């Protein structure tokens, strides 16, 4: 589990840097400033949770494997739902995609709670 979570953190972090650079360079002048801000929010939260995956990997390495696994899966789901929906909203302008974003936020919150519960077990 530790290796999976650290690998996922690295991949999601790399993709977050790519998304941030894409938003800062390729989308400037193509999207209005509000949609750029939406895209940047997705990239920022993706990077936060790439780091959170490394925290989950650390926790898994100290024996809290179940809690770390849940935290990691929830962080990954949050990135897909939260950041993914914001990227899609910014790129397509389809406002209905914003309805998915809170589900990703809930996954992030649940992941942090799982991480905290796991930390109490080590």
Image (cartoon, rainbow, N blue to C red):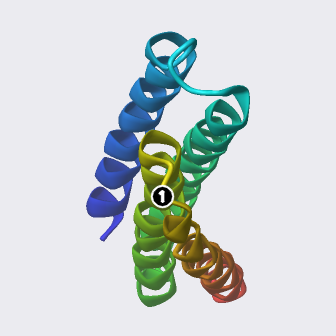
Image quarter (top left, top right, bottom left or bottom right) of the C terminus: bottom right
In the image, residue 96 sits, relative to residue 11, either above or below, namely: below
Q: Is residue 1 left or right of residue 101?
A: left
- Nearer to us in this view, 89 or 56: 89
- Nearer to us in this view, 4 or 15: 15
- Residue 41 in the image: state x and y as whole percent: 66, 44
The residue lying at 40 percent from left, 79 percent from top is 69
Q: Is residue 110 left or right of residue 54?
A: right
In the image, residue 118 sits, relative to residue 90, either above or below, namely: below
- Nearer to us in this view, 98 or 67: 98
| Element class at badge 1 | loop
Q: How many marks?
A: 1
- Residue 114 in the image: state x and y as whole percent: 61, 85
The residue lying at 49 percent from left, 20 percent from top is 27
- Residue 118 in the image: state x and y as whole percent: 61, 84
The residue lying at 56 percent from left, 16 percent from top is 24
- Nearer to us in this view, 22 or 17: 22
Image quarter (top left, top right, bottom left or bottom right) of the N terminus: bottom left
Tell me which corner region of the image, top left, top right, bottom left or bottom right, holds residue 3.
Answer: bottom left
Mark 1, other Cα within 10 Å: few <14 / some 14–19 / many ≥20: few
What residue did someone put label 1 on? 94
Q: Is residue 35 left or right of residue 27?
A: right
In the image, residue 53 sits, relative to residue 30, either above or below, namely: below
- Residue 60 in the image: state x and y as whole percent: 44, 72
The residue lying at 54 percent from left, 64 percent from top is 82
């Amino acid at each position: 589990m530790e290796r999976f979570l650290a690998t996922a953190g690295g991949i999601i972090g790399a993709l977050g840097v790519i998304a941030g650079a894409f938003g800062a360079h390729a989308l400037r002048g193509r999207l209005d400033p509000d949609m750029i801000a939406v895209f940047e929010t997705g990239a920022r939260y993706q990077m936060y949770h790439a780091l959170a995956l490394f925290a989950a990997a650390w926790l898994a390495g100290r024996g809290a494997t179940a809690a770390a696994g849940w935290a990691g899966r929830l962080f990954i789901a949050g990135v897909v739902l939260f950041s993914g929906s914001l990227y899609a909203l910014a790129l397509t302008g389809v406002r209905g995609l914003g309805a998915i974003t809170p589900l990703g936020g809930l996954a992030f919150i649940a992941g942090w709670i799982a991480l905290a519960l796991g930390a109490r077990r080590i």
